[in-house]
Structure formats: C-alpha cells, structure tokens
C-alpha cells in the first residue's frame, strides 16, 4: 500500500517497551493494530481474533478466561498482521538492541542502503516515505546507491526535473562553455529525454519544494 506523508507521520512506530508478559503485549499490539486500521481506513482484525482478544484482555475479561495456548496463538496472529501492514522497508519486530522494545524497525538491507546513500533520517516517517518513493521508481535496497541521484528543486515535477537536467548536464560538462548555446536549450525537454531514454524519475520529497531524483536500471 502507498502511504501519504501525513499517514506515515501518524504511524504508531513504537508499540511496547519494558515487558515480555503476554498479557501486556496483547494489549499493546492490539492497540497498535487498531491505530494502523484507523490510518489505513481498513479493518484488519478478523472477527475470530477480536473475540479472542476481548476474552483474554478485554474490559470484561477475567482471570478464569485466560488460556496460555490461546494467548500465544493470538499474539502470533497480531504479530503477523502488524508485520504484513508495515510500510515498505520496515518490519514489525523487537529492536535488535532491546528484545523488549517492539515496533516497526528498518530492515537490515534498507538500513544499510540508506546509510550508504547518507540518507538515514532520524524520523522513521521520512525514511519510509523515501523508501516508498525509491520503490515506485523501480529501485530496491540493492540498487539504491546506484540509482539515487539526489534532490532537486521546484514547485512541480517538471520544474524540478528541468532544474536537475540543467545541473546534470553542466556538472557532467556535456556542453561547451558557450552561453548562448546553453541559454537556448529547453531543459524541460532534456528532462523528458532523461525520463524516456534513461529511466529517470522525480518524486516529491517530504520537504516542500524539493523532489527526489532516481534512475532505475
């Protein structure tokens, strides 16, 4: 699923900390999944799972309702649903450095790819939005370093593309230092050629007036 930046900014990245008790995790994971359902505007909780949750840790549950085997199966089901709902590049799991800290964490391959591109943002929503844009451009964690061309500026994809095309041509020294020749070029047409013939792609960034530039291979 494709998420908007506002949806990712509202995402419940952290779910539970400081406990491995099944009853605590059931409540936290249930609350996290409900928040994911609200953001996605889709009910992801099967009726049978909801019935188990209400029986085990619902408001009207009691100690006699607790069954260890059912609790374990229900917890596994919640875990699977949260993992399936995770934004691109993330998985629902415990933190590598803290087994009692559960949430949505960057997968190892994307973490490494973002570090290699010097694009590891502090906010997970920014990382998720960037990864989503890269995948839409046809890139994977393995091809990101080669395919990410940086950021460009403009109020639209066309404007940002034309700006990038001019910078790309000038940095590559593809034209002689002749002012009139450079000034006569239609940089938007150059950008269209880069898209059509070299698989370039511009995607809105999470910063106003900027676009990510990718090239798929």
Image (tube, rainbow, N blue to C red):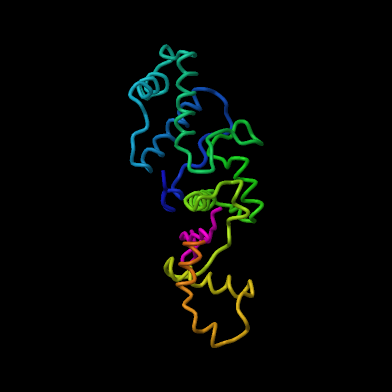
| Callout count | 0
Which x, y percent locates residue 2? 42, 47
Q: Which of these two is toward me, 92 or 198?
A: 198
State whether residue 215 is above or below residue 91: below
Q: Which of these two is toward me, 191 or 9?
A: 191
Identified at 48% across, 75% down, the residue is 187
State whether residue 137 is above or below residue 14: below
The N terminus is located in which quarter? Answer: top left
Which x, y percent locates residue 65? 41, 13
Which x, y percent locates residue 52? 39, 20
Identified at 47% across, 18% down, the residue is 71
Q: Which of these two is toward me, 96 or 59?
A: 96
State whether residue 109 is above or below residue 168: above
Identified at 59% across, 46% down, the residue is 141
Q: Is residue 206 magenta?
A: yes
Give the left or right position of residue 1, taking residue 194 as reference: left
Which picture quadrant has residue 166? bottom right
Q: Is residue 208 magenta?
A: yes
Q: Which residues are drawn in magenta?
A: 198-217
Identified at 38% across, 19% down, the residue is 55
- Residue sticking out furthest to the bottom: 180
- Residue sticking out furthest to the front: 197
Which x, y percent locates residue 6? 42, 52
Give the left or right position of residue 112, taking residue 196 as reference: right
């Amino acid at each position: 699923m494709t998420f908007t930046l506002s949806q990712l900014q509202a995402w419940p990245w952290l779910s539970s900390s400081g406990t491995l008790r099944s009853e605590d995790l059931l409540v936290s994971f249930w609350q996290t999944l409900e928040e994911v359902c609200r953001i996605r505007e889709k009910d992801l909780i099967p009726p049978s799972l909801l019935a188990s949750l209400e029986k085990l840790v619902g408001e009207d549950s009691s100690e006699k309702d607790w069954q260890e085997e059912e609790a374990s199966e229900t917890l596994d089901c919640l875990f699977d649903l949260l993992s399936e709902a995770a934004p691109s590049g993330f998985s629902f799991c415990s933190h590598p450095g803290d087994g009692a800290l559960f949430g949505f964490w960057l997968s190892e391959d994307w973490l490494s790819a973002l570090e290699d591109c010097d694009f590891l943002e502090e906010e997970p929503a920014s990382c998720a939005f960037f990864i989503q844009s890269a995948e839409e451009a046809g890139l994977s964690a393995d091809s990101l370093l080669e395919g990410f061309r940086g950021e460009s500026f403009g109020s639209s994809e066309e404007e940002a593309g034309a700006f990038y095309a001019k910078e790309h041509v000038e940095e590559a020294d593809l034209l002689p230092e002749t002012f009139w020749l450079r000034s006569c070029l239609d940089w938007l047409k150059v950008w269209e050629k880069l898209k059509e013939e070299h698989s370039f792609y511009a995607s809105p960034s999470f910063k106003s007036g900027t676009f990510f530039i990718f090239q798929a291979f």
